[in-house]
Image (cartoon, coloured by chain):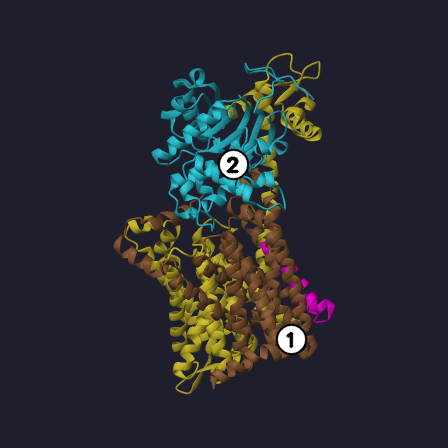
């Protein structure tokens, strides 16, 4: 069932894109978290999602993966539902979302990235271990493979998460604030890895906090405020006016 | 004198039928709860096991009331159903009211236990002495185990381990990083329910040897002790199972040397001793002492340890 | 006094004492700590009996309180090592102390406490335990002890009400205004332990929790004010106690168990039927609000698709929003009834002025 849509100046509806979001609304209980979002994520770009706290940034990427129930609307990943495209997407959750006291080492965590391809019943083996080791090398943590994850620094933990995503070898990276509170080396490492991925044509979607660095690191930006404020190339939409709308209207909405 | 007694008990394991089953049954409990307890510990559901085991009590009574036999499989089925139900009630309270988990656990364990006592005393009032065997589930009575019980326990434990081995990878990833597991397509809710089910089975096995009141220690203490020595999940499970098994055997042996002593308390004291030794002497350099020293040095400053455990606790 | 009255009086006083303190335990999220304390007092009681050679009230209470403090401190100690989480520490400390207590009870012949008594309590025997002053019978011992405890608990709560309230609500603020929440914490734990020891005689180690937590949790679903929560909790506790006693009498079952069961039933009723916070009213409210939100979503959708060539009907809405046809129709019909949308001659849905305002209220354009 093809339906006609406009209201946005954007590519024809039948173009296959990494992520298409249509009329998306997400509510937690009865509290709106995202309201009627229409958005296209282009291929091969570094895309930042910015907005004030509670703007629905994390919710948006979680909605893409079906981690939060959708109240209305549709999301497609390369023109199909996410459940059919899992192998094309890697998720990097917020570092604080897991228990770093968990009895496991860095290599083991990276290996978890390969569980999706293994499927049920099949066990990790020497091949998956080797693959995981290579990914750990890419983030500069080869020497820390056997290190208990709780003994890694915050930045190293974040790099382990990135390595786990690399192990998945996806087309799309969905990352929830991977640069939040990390050291300079980690930030540099992660960015150079992502730069290379982008050159390979991968799409990177990142929830980002630091407005100062948006135009430096990213090609594209999505500005959220429960509603979509703007989504497009940095030069076009990352403007003072849009920033004001994104960061002020939320207060108005919550006061109402 | 004491030595002689211990020796005769040890010899008894191989020669005396009763003793053999006592030891075997207690070992089965210790191994199962030790291994599965690792997951309750890591899922931060330590006291959930306490609510589950207390909730099992009315199930035992009701199974007996309806079936009229002390067939251990039936009693365990009743216990399992109620333990599950207790778990659902606890989750239901926390997810639909503003009551926090601790109070929800308190409600479940005390009310279900009360119901259990009502049913047990009812059985007592209608059946006289015939229910006498049921209150052994309060503190456990390994000495009452007979061959068929032990076979049943063995079957249940084997079932638990099959599930644990088959779904090890899935349990691990769902426990460590649920959101990520979900993004890979694992049904974390169902995995959680399956894991709870095997924990319920472990609890039900434990009712025979440790009893409803002290069962919680058998889920937490072996896992916590193993955690002090080990930094990998698989080896933690194995060591925890070994600790649990040892405490089961040692505890039931000691209690069988004394007339009229429940096994539960002795097993619990044994496993707590193992945990104490682990806390003080583990290769993480007797964390206790190290920490206290550090704390004196860096009072007020957040030391590295503080940071790490802070990470673990911070919310997503 | 008749023995029935003594038992009921004892039950009512146990319930009232526990339920009043319990309000703070629920609010401070210390329910399981009180579970630990109520188990651990057994050890203190047994040791006190060994030392004194009989079950004198004062030494027993002192022993119980000391073991309660021991429990709290041991839990803190384990937790502070950083190797165990708080709930794990609780789950290790109290079974250990309780296990020692149980072994001492069962192995020492002269304690006169049996395992059943430990778990069920023996409120049935309250009438037979009378207190003598100068060899004059002054009535039931349990009533006297529980009565004095009630006075102590009421004084504790009313004298330190402000401090308890602030340190429960915001411990760091309490520090900043010099209210010493740590001291309050330990005082509260001492009161919990004292109450647990005294109640132990009547209802045993586990069903004390039913009186500490269950009525307080129930009243927490009925009111938002601490000043009302405490009396309400006490009332619920007393109702459960009396109902439980009557049931136990008619069914010939354990009184303590029956009282705990009644507390659970009372809580269950509140959980389902409480105004505002009960399952029923919650479900009703949620589905109503959810529907309103969905209406808002549809209005916003209509508002954004303003080009005339759009065929906006309930089926196109169902397609765009991923709702079933039936549900889309329901939302549309509601909006038509409420005059938020209207249909033009070709059957297309258009926003009315009030519909547009409502949509813009959500998007705040």
Q: Which colour represents chain B?
A: brown
- Letter of the chain that mark 1 sits on in the rendering: B
Q: Is residue C57 visible?
A: no
Instruction: Return the residue at label 1.
Output: B133
Q: Residue C92, how many percent across, how many down?
A: 46, 63
- The magenta region covers B61-89
Instruction: Name the main secondary structure of what is drawn in magenta.
Output: helix
Local crowd size for mark 2, using a 10 Å CA cut-off: few (<14), some (14–19), many (≥20): many
Residue A116, located in which quarter of the rendered image? top right
State the residue position of label 2. A167
SS for callout 2 = helix
Q: Which x, y percent locates residue B163?
A: 63, 54
Could you tell me which residue is drawn at 42 percent across and 65 percent down?
A: B276
Relative to residue A126, is residue A210 depicted above or below?
above
| Circle 1 crowding by C-alpha within 10 Å: few under 14, some 14–19, many from 20 | few
- For the colour yellow, the matching chain is C
Which shade is chain A? cyan
Q: Is residue B79 magenta?
A: yes
Most distant residue in the top direction:
C308
Separation of residues labelled 1 and 2 (CA atoms):
57 Å
Disc 1 and disc 2 on one polypeptide chain: no
Q: Secondary structure at mark 1?
A: helix
Residue situated in front as seen by the camera: B275 or B132: B275
Q: Nearer the viewer, residue C356 or B97?
A: B97
Q: Position of residue B52 (x, y in %)?
A: 58, 60
**Residue found 52% across the figure and 81% down from its top:** B7
Q: Position of residue B281 (x, y in %)?
A: 38, 63
Residue C216 appears in view? yes
Q: Is residue A235 left or right of residue B77?
A: left
User: What residue do we see at 37% from left, 56% from top?
Assistant: C164
Q: Chain of mark 2?
A: A
């Amino acid at each position: 069932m093809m339906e006609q849509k406009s209201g946005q100046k954007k590519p024809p509806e039948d173009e296959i894109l990494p992520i298409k979001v249509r009329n998306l609304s997400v509510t937690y209980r009865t509290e709106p978290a995202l309201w009627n979002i229409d958005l296209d994520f282009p291929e091969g770009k570094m895309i930042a999602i910015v907005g004030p706290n509670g703007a629905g940034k994390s919710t948006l990427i979680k909605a893409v993966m079906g981690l939060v129930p959708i109240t209305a609307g549709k999301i497609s990943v390369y023109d199909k539902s996410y459940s059919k495209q899992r192998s094309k997407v890697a998720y990097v959750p917020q570092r604080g979302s897991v228990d770093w006291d968990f009895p496991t080492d860095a290599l083991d965590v990276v290996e978890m990235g390969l569980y999706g391809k293994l499927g049920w019943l099949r066990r990790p083996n020497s091949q998956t271990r080797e693959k995981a080791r290579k990914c750990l090398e890419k983030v500069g943590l080869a020497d820390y493979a056997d290190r208990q994850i709780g003994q890694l620094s915050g930045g190293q933990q974040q790099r382990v998460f990135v390595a786990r995503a690399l192990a998945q070898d996806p087309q799309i990276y969905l990352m929830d604030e991977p640069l939040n509170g990390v050291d300079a080396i980690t930030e540099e490492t992660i960015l150079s890895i992502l730069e290379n991925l982008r050159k390979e044509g991968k799409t990177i979607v990142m929830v980002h906090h630091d407005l100062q660095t948006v135009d430096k690191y990213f090609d594209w930006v999505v500005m959220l405020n429960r509603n979509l404020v703007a989504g497009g190339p940095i030069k076009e939409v990352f403007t003072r006016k849009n920033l004001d709308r994104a960061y002020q209207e939320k207060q108005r909405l919550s006061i109402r | 004198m004491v030595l002689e007694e211990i020796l005769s008990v040890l010899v008894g394991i191989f020669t005396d039928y009763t003793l053999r089953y006592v030891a075997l049954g207690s070992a089965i409990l210790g191994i199962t709860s030790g291994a599965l307890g690792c997951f309750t510990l890591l899922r931060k559901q330590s006291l959930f096991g306490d609510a589950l085991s207390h909730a099992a009590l009315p199930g035992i009574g009701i199974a007996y009331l309806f079936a009229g036999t002390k067939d251990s499989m039936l009693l365990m089925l009743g216990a399992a159903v109620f333990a599950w139900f207790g778990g659902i009630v606890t989750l239901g309270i926390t997810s639909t009211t503003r009551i926090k988990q601790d109070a929800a656990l308190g409600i479940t364990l005390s009310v279900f236990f009360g119901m259990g006592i009502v049913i047990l005393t009812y059985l007592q009032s209608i059946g006289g002495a015939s229910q006498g065997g049921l209150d052994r589930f309060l503190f456990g009575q390994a000495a009452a185990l007979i061959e068929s019980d032990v076979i049943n326990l063995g079957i249940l434990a084997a079932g638990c381990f099959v599930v644990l081995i088959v779904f090890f990878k899935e349990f691990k990833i769902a426990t460590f990083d649920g959101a990520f597991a979900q993004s890979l397509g694992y049904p974390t809710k169902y995995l959680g329910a399956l894991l709870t089910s095997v924990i319920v089975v472990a609890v039900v096995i434990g009712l025979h040897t440790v009893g409803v009141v002290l069962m919680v220690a058998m889920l937490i203490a072996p896992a916590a002790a193993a955690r002090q020595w080990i930094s990998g999940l698989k080896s933690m499970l194995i060591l925890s199972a070994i600790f649990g098994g040892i405490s089961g055997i040692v505890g039931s042996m000691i209690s069988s040397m004394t007339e009229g002593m429940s096994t539960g308390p002795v097993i619990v004291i044994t496993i707590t001793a193992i945990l104490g030794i682990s806390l003080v002497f583990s290769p993480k350099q007797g964390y206790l002492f190290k920490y206290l020293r550090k704390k004196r040095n860096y009072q007020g400053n957040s030391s590295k340890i503080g940071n790490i455990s802070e990470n673990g606790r911070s919310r997503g | 006094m008749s023995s029935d009255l003594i038992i009921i009086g004892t039950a009512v006083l146990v319930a009232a004492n526990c339920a009043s303190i319990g309000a703070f335990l629920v609010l401070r999220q210390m329910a399981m700590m009180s579970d630990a304390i109520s188990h651990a007092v057994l050890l203190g009681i047994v040791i006190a009996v060994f030392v004194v050679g009989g079950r004198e009230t004062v030494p027993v209470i002192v022993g119980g309180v000391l073991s309660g403090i021991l429990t709290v401190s041991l839990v803190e100690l384990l937790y502070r090592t950083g190797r165990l989480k708080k709930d794990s520490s609780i789950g290790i400390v109290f079974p250990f102390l309780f296990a020692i207590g149980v072994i001492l009870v069962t192995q020492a012949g002269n304690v006169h406490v049996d395992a059943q008594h430990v778990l069920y309590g023996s409120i049935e025997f309250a009438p037979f335990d009378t207190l003598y002053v100068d060899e004059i019978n002054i009535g039931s011992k349990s009533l006297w002890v529980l009565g004095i405890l009630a006075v102590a608990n009421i004084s504790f709560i009313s004298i330190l009400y402000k401090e308890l309230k602030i340190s429960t609500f915001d411990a760091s603020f309490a520090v900043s205004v010099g209210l010493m929440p740590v001291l309050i914490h330990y005082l509260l734990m001492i009161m919990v332990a004292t109450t647990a020891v005294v109640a132990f005689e009547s209802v045993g180690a586990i069903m004390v929790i039913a009186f500490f937590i269950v009525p307080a949790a129930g009243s927490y679903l009925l009111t938002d004010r601490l000043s009302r929560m405490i009396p309400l909790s006490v009332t619920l506790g007393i109702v459960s106690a009396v109902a439980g006693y009557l049931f136990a009498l008619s069914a010939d079952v354990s009184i303590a168990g029956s009282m705990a069961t009644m507390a659970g039933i009372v809580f269950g009723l509140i959980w389902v039927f409480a105004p505002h916070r009960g399952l029923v009213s919650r479900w009703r409210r949620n589905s109503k609000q959810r529907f309103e939100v969905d209406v808002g979503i549809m209005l916003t959708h209509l508002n954004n698709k303003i080009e005339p060539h759009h065929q906006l009907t309930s089926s196109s809405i169902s397609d765009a929003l991923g709702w079933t046809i039936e549900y889309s129709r329901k939302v549309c019909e509601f909006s038509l009834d409420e005059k938020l949308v209207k249909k033009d001659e070709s059957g297309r849905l258009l926003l009315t002025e009030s519909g547009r305002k409502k949509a813009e209220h959500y998007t705040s354009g």
